[in-house]
């Protein structure tokens, strides 16, 4: 039973979860690109990047064989790159509405270059994730520079989540409005963010269980029958509760990461303007000495230091400090 569960996890669950997680991130970047370039259609990249994630996962498993690794790994990767480029170029033609999908291929258009960059990042991120998933159940290395694979997975998961949140937020709020403290908060739940968090946590839960199982084996601990099933049930229940809380959260992303960011950016702008005022005040005062009539210096008091003040809170969209604090606590947790 344990062997079958392990095969199911390695051959079906992991690649599917990685494809969904990568698709969620790329979907946000595609939406962001379409916001800046309305004529561009990049939906095909979501499918290609998800497929690249699956291929990268199995590619890592295939190349772990030392014989295959020594017999031309670079040729294998070169073939992957060529196929990826051709698929991106054909997808760009189809998205542009060209009747001939191979028209102008090969080319170095902006859409093709951007698509290849996204596919390459998806492939590379999945490659390192597949490596960490493979090493989760292996014995630890006793080295000062050793980082457990479960920790590497967690950092990569959180990094992807931050990129996803920022890209998703920028599709809803113009970049120039981030420092506008009078702007109304962003409202609405972002579906791909919720899906990414749930899928990523499922992978981390499985990785954590494998890590504990290895530690139990090293300690020769007696593990109760059905531990794997109980772990899965409780993990699923926890994720359901987390999803419900995320959907029903009072802040509802209204004072989310970007809205907290705009408050922080406003404070930074104020601090910078105040510092600049302090630096320039003596020079402005010296210049004022030479600005009198008839060549006689005129004595004036130094100009007052002025810095930006946040606009007053209004019902139309001012800063709701309670919501910002509540959001900061939520993201910290």
Image: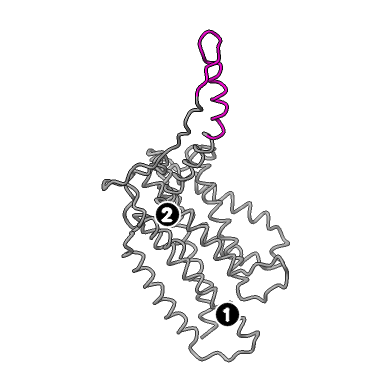
Where residue 60 sits, quadrant-wise, is bottom right
Q: Which residues are magenta?
A: 278-300
What color scheme is it?
Answer: one colour
Q: Is residue 60 left or right of residue 104?
A: right
Tell me what residue is drawn at x 64 percent, y 89 percent: 220
The front one of 24 and 162 is 162
Tell me what residue is drawn at x 46 percent, y 41 percent: 270
- Discs 1/2, front: 2
Q: Is residue 2 above or below residue 56?
A: below
The front one of 264 and 247 is 264
The total number of labels drawn is 2
Q: Position of residue 16 (x, y in %)?
A: 47, 66
As drawn, the label of residue 54 is none
Q: Is residue 156 above or below residue 89?
A: below
Q: Position of residue 261 (x, y in %)?
A: 44, 50
Q: Give neighbour class at mark 2: few <14, some 14-19, many 20+ (Cα, 10 Å).
A: some
Tell me what residue is drawn at x 60 percent, y 89 percent: 221
Q: Is residue 284 magenta-colored?
A: yes
Cα distance between the residues tagged 1 and 2: 33 Å
Q: Position of residue 35 (x, y in %)?
A: 39, 42
Q: Secondary structure at mark 1?
A: helix
The front one of 61 and 262 is 262
Q: Earlier in the sequence, mark 1 or mark 2?
A: 1
Query: Which residue lies under the disc numbered 1?
Result: 212
Q: Position of residue 117 (x, y in %)?
A: 54, 47
Q: Is residue 309 above or below residue 71?
A: above
Q: Secondary structure at mark 2?
A: helix
Tell me what residue is drawn at x 50 percent, y 66 percent: 15
Q: Is residue 203 above or below residue 37?
A: below
Q: Residue furthest top?
A: 294
| CB contact under 8 Å: marks 1 and 2 | no
As drawn, the label of residue 257 is 2
């Amino acid at each position: 039973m344990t062997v079958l569960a392990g095969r199911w996890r390695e051959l079906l669950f992991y690649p599917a979860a990685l494809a969904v997680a990568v698709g969620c991130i790329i979907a946000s970047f595609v939406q962001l690109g379409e916001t800046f370039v309305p004529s561009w259609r990049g939906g095909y990249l979501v499918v290609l990047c998800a497929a690249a994630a699956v291929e990268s996962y199995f590619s890592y498993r295939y190349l772990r064989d030392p014989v295959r690794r020594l017999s031309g790994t670079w040729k294998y990767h070169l073939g992957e790159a060529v196929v990826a480029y051709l698929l991106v170029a054909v997808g760009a033609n189809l998205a542009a509405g060209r009747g001939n999908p191979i028209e102008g291929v090969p080319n170095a258009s902006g859409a093709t270059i951007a698509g290849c960059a996204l596919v390459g990042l998806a492939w590379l991120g999945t490659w390192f994730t597949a490596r960490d998933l493979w090493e989760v159940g292996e014995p630890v290395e006793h080295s000062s520079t050793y980082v457990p694979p479960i920790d590497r997975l967690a950092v990569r998961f959180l990094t992807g989540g931050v990129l996803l949140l920022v890209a998703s937020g920028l599709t809803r709020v113009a970049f120039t409005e981030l420092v506008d403290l009078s702007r109304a908060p962003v409202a609405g739940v972002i579906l791909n963010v919720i899906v990414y968090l749930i899928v990523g946590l499922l992978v981390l839960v499985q990785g954590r269980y494998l890590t504990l199982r290895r530690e139990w084996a090293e300690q020769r601990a007696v593990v109760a029958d059905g531990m794997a099933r109980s772990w899965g049930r409780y993990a699923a229940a926890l994720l359901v509760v987390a999803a419900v809380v995320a959907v029903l959260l009072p802040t509802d992303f209204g004072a989310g990461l970007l809205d907290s960011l705009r408050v922080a950016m406003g404070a930074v702008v104020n601090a910078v303007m105040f510092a600049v005022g302090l630096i320039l005040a003596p020079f402005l005062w010296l210049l004022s000495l030479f600005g009198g009539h008839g060549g006689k210096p005129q004595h004036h008091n130094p100009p007052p230091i002025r810095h930006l003040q946040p606009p007053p809170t209004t019902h139309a969209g001012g800063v709701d400090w309670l919501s910002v604090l509540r959001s900061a606590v939520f993201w910290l947790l």
